Amino acid sequence: MRIVRMKASFGGLRNRELALGEGLNIIEAPNEGGKSTWSAFLRAMLYGVNTKERDRQGYIAEKNRYQPWGGGPMEGSVELIWQGQSITLRRSAKGSTPFGQFEAVYTDTQEPVPGLTGANAGEVLTGVPREVFERSAFVGQGGAAIDGAPALEARIAALASSGEEDVSYSQVERRLRDWLNRRKHNKTGLIPRLEGELAEIDAALARQAKAFRLSQEAKREIDRLQAEHRLLEAERDAHLARAMAQRRERWEAAQAALAQAQGQVDNLEAERTRHGPPPDRDTLKKAQEELNALNALHTSRRLTESQLEEARAAEAEAEAAAEDPLFPELTPDQAWQQASEDAEAAERTPRTGGLYAGGGILLAAGAAALVLGIAGVLPALWMGLALCGVGLAAGAALLAAAGTAKKRAAAAAAEILARYEAESPQDILGRANAYRESRVVAEQAAKKREELERTLSELNQRDEATRSRLLELVHPFAPGVTDSFGVSAALSRALNLDEKLSTARVRLEGAKKLADSLPRPEDTAADPGVEPRFDPAETAARLTAAEGELSRLRGGLAMAQGELNTLGAPEEFRARREAVTEELERRRAEYDAIAAALAALEGAHGQLQARFSPALNRRAGELLSRLTGGKYDKVALTQQFEALAEEHDGLTPRRALALSQGTADQLYLAVRLAVCGLVLPGDDPCPLVLDDALANFDDGRCALALALLEELGRERQILLFTCHTREAALLAEHPGVSIQTLQS
């Protein structure tokens, strides 16, 4: 078998294509460049995807790991040459199953290839099942080691033990164990089955006797219970007839209550909407609140009116108290100005001091002139007398003028004081101040009266607006209302009717629920006239118990009779028991003989395993010698499939763990290649897939490995995926090698 071309939408591959040549193919790509994905794709195209595998810690199942990254279904095709013909394999999704749809056709004609299915394609094309392919021809990344897979072990063991792939210890051993297990394997096989059959026969004989006894007891108990059941049925019917009578009474009462409640609702609705439908309850409640506010407003208005009358009286009183004939229609300031001037006038004294002083001086001068005349100082006495007379006359005149002026001033002051009815000028100012204070009181009284008048006007306006609004609200359902009392009555009546209607509707709803919960009683049979021994519940319970017991007894009787019918006659069981006993003894003898043969075979195989697979070890040693340049030339494979390597001149084999990583990989690659040669079909061999299998090889041994692979490539196609460029460089000039680089 040779791969020609692969096309894939698989994992990171999106509609990618890979063409391959014959012999050795080196496919170079960087890490995460699709190498492992192409390897997994080829395996999936051959053997399908394991849909039963599940994700687990640190591992993603293949069906999830290789879902196309860009979305869309997992699908692809592989064109290959098989048995000299070109065929194409196609896989795609089937429902939610990845790669569940399979098709195999001849490439040229697109006719189906007979016998190839999605389940068997890999095994038919490669000649081996999936586990053998994975552990021989398919070397995944970091997976060069092999293990003891059952299918691979069977092929290797056949070759190692007999030299023939079709004849092996495993097959013989498996056949003997199959024969042994057929006779006895835990609780299965012919012997346990015969033992079980013998036990069943004995049990059947015991069941037969027991079934006969139980059937007789059941018949007697059934007869007794049937009589009791008939009596309980009569008592139940009596209870039922009486209960139905009571139920009819309750139903009729419920229907009457329903009719009454409906009539009450209808009457209240008619009364409520007699003149027109009232507003909703909230609106009525709000209107009542406004009416209450209106009543409060009336109270405020009456209070304001009373206060206004008092204010008007107080204003009149203050105005009367503020009137003073001395200050007619004068402002307080004007009155104060007048009183100040009058007080000043009343307090003013005429200036008569000069007159009195002048008069005195003149009188003194006259007297002095007379003295001078008499004393002879003056030239003549008459001169003294004349001067004395003039001085006395002038002095007397001045004194008289002073007295007159003083009298006039006193009279004017007295007149002012008399006018003010005051005793002093300060009393005049006091009267003016009293006038001013009384005017202030009168003005304050006037302001208070004005404020109360404004308040009363506002209250009257609010009263009128509220009253009009309330009348407008109630007129649709109370057209005769004209005042607040009517509004109040209408609102109360509407709310009362609404409350009654709500109550009536609740009552109606309850009556409906009650009526609906009580179905119309059906006519029942007449009372049988039996006086029940128990109440209805106990009668029903006893009847149910009796029916259950009758059912159980009848079932038990049927089972017992069925058991008797099924089991048959005791004579047949005894004859069968004798035959089974003879067969059991014969099978036990066979079991002992097969067990002895198997023990002998295991002993012989143990000796054969001491020199396990000389051919495999020899071929693996030859390949390892070529891979290591002759340093290691012997390989031994243990029963646990652990590979051991021995140096050319070494004394003891070395385990893989004791080797370098590169040498260990070379050891397991040699074993793999040897296994491929032994277990894979030689005719039309399947390709060998190597994913970075040479990564840990040094340059020298890498060249040796490539030379070996190039040689093996003449026999089968080899796909070597690598992330390095050295492989391509080493074989760049070799015509039989196909080299290509994958684009990331």
Image: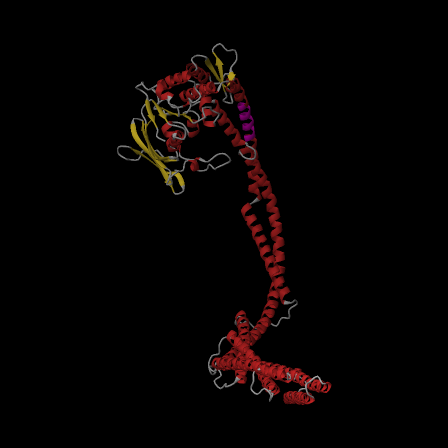
x and y percentages locating residue 593 in the rendered image: 54, 25
Question: Magenta region's main secondary structure?
Answer: helix
Q: Is residue 215 positioned above or below 308 on the image?
A: above
Q: Which residues are magenta?
A: 587-598
In which quadrant is the N terminus drawn? top left
Q: Quadrant of residue 236?
A: bottom right
Q: Is residue 198 visible?
A: yes
Q: How is the image coloured?
A: secondary structure
Query: Closer to the camera, 644 or 199?
Result: 644
x and y percentages locating residue 495 in the rendered image: 54, 78
x and y percentages locating residue 82 in the rendered image: 32, 27
Q: Is residue 160 positioned above or below 476 on the image?
A: above
Is 588 magenta? The answer is yes
Q: Quadrant of residue 341?
A: bottom right
Q: Residue furthest top?
A: 649
Q: Quadrant of residue 739?
A: top left
x and y percentages locating residue 81 in the rendered image: 31, 27
The structure residue drawn at horizontal position 61% and vertical position 54%, both measured from the top left corner, is 218
Query: Closer to the camera, 182 or 144?
Result: 144
The mark tally for this picture is: 0
